[in-house]
Image: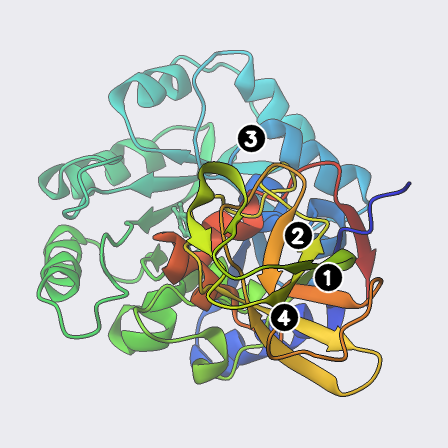
Amino acid sequence: MARPTSATIHIDALRHNLARVRALAPRSKVMAVVKADGYGHGLERVTRALAGADAFGVAAFADAERIRSAGLSNRIVLLSGLDDPADLPLLRGLDVDVVVHHDSQLALLEADTAHTPLRVWLKIDTGMHRLGFPPARAAELRARLLALPQVREVVLMSHFASSDDFHGAQTPAQIAAFDAADGMPGEACSLANSAAILGWPNAHRDWVRAGGALYGLSVVAGKTGADFGLKPAMTLATRLVAINRVRRGEPIGYSATWTCPEDMDIGVAAIGYGDGYPRSVPSGTPAILRRAQGGDVRVPIVGRVSMDLLTLDLRNAPDARVGDPVVLWGPQLPAEEVAAAAGTIAYELTCSITRRVRFFEA
Ligand SMILES: Cc1ncc(COP(=O)(O)O)c(C=O)c1O
């Protein structure tokens, strides 16, 4: 039996979300961040749909190779930067911009003797304390890079730690640290990720770097992408493969974590953590049953999610039939809601879909 588990990618939603990002940041160029196989949506499909973006942000050369093989000539930025002298000819061969966030990378670049000049994104750590140079070094490093014949442009960039907190103090502090470091006004700079595009317009600057927003996802607590005019770009779905009548008092699934409060129908859907659906969701997390008769209805997951299957309380859905589609997230059920139940963010859900799930475009 072929597994009926599918991820349908909504190409129109990707395009709509790019237009929405442009409307939110009208004076900025847009880098579409397509790391992790386009946040799990499929790199080639996503980059073709978002070919109107000014650049793509990737985490690995392999991604840049795939984008070029797909025939796309957009600017590409290697967000992870270089870590080997052999990376330099690769950057040139693929025509890829490179992030420089550490002295070891600067040394590789300075030792480079090839003549084709590269575009460099100089990363400043304004408070996230993950990657980047101290703000006090920004002006000196930019001048040093621009003096190299092997560098033709420097974009100054930083990354926010908590731009999803629209009322917090950390983002204004990071913006202030960036502005204090930016000793050469007029040069291009880039600060904003998706949450900053949505909530911090004074961080938009020359380039915004949108990831989640392009997939219709929000990381702002309690808000879905739809709350910001974005459309979810993925529907994860499967089908009911069994409906079983279970007696009151009987336990459901591994470790017997849920007990039937009455005689009731339990639906079994062909999806589990082997497909990337999170095992950590508690009983009560919703799915949507698309009944052949009676339309869509929310049905709670009950018991543990297992590798291939999960179980559903069908008391709301007396007309359910084996074969009915079950939607785990998508336009009708925000991935953000499932992510909150699983104690994570929607990005992790879409990035975790496994290879046995069949992908479709709509
Ligand atoms: C440097 C950088 N910029 C931008 C992004 C995009 O972030 P988001 O998906 O929240 O828009 C990421 C993703 O993690 C990133 O690492």
Camera-near label (4 vs 1) is 4
**Gap between marks 2 and 1 measured at Cα:** 7 Å
Q: Which secondary structure lies at badge 2? A: loop
Disc 4 within 8 angstroms of ligand 1 (CB): no
Between 297 and 186, the one nearer to me in the picture = 297
The residue carrying mark 1 is 9
Between disc 4 and disc 1, whose residue precedes? 1
Taking 308 as reference, is 21 above or below it? below
The amino acid type of the residue labelled 1 equals Ile
The amino acid type of the residue labelled 2 equals His
Q: Which mark identifies residue 41?
A: 2
Camera-near label (3 vs 2) is 2
Q: Which mark identifies residue 333?
A: none
Residue drawn at 75 percent across, 86 percent down = 295
The residue carrying mark 4 is 314
Number of callouts: 4
Q: Are marks 2 and 1 in contact (CB under 8 Å)?
A: yes
Between disc 3 and disc 2, whose residue precedes? 2
Between 282 and 355, the one nearer to me in the picture = 282
> How far across and how far down the image is residue 217, in percent?
49, 66
Between disc 2 and disc 4, whose residue precedes? 2
Number of other residues with Cα within 10 Å of mark 3, as a class: few under 14, some 14 to 19, many 20 or more: some
**Gap between marks 3 and 4 measured at Cα:** 45 Å
Residue drawn at 15 percent across, 74 percent down = 167
Between disc 2 and disc 1, whose residue precedes? 1
Disc 3 within 8 angstroms of ligand 1 (CB): no
Camera sees residue 359: yes
The residue carrying mark 3 is 60
**Gap between marks 2 and 4 measured at Cα:** 30 Å
The amino acid type of the residue labelled 3 equals Ala
User: Left or right: where does residue 71 sit relative to residue 128?
Assistant: right
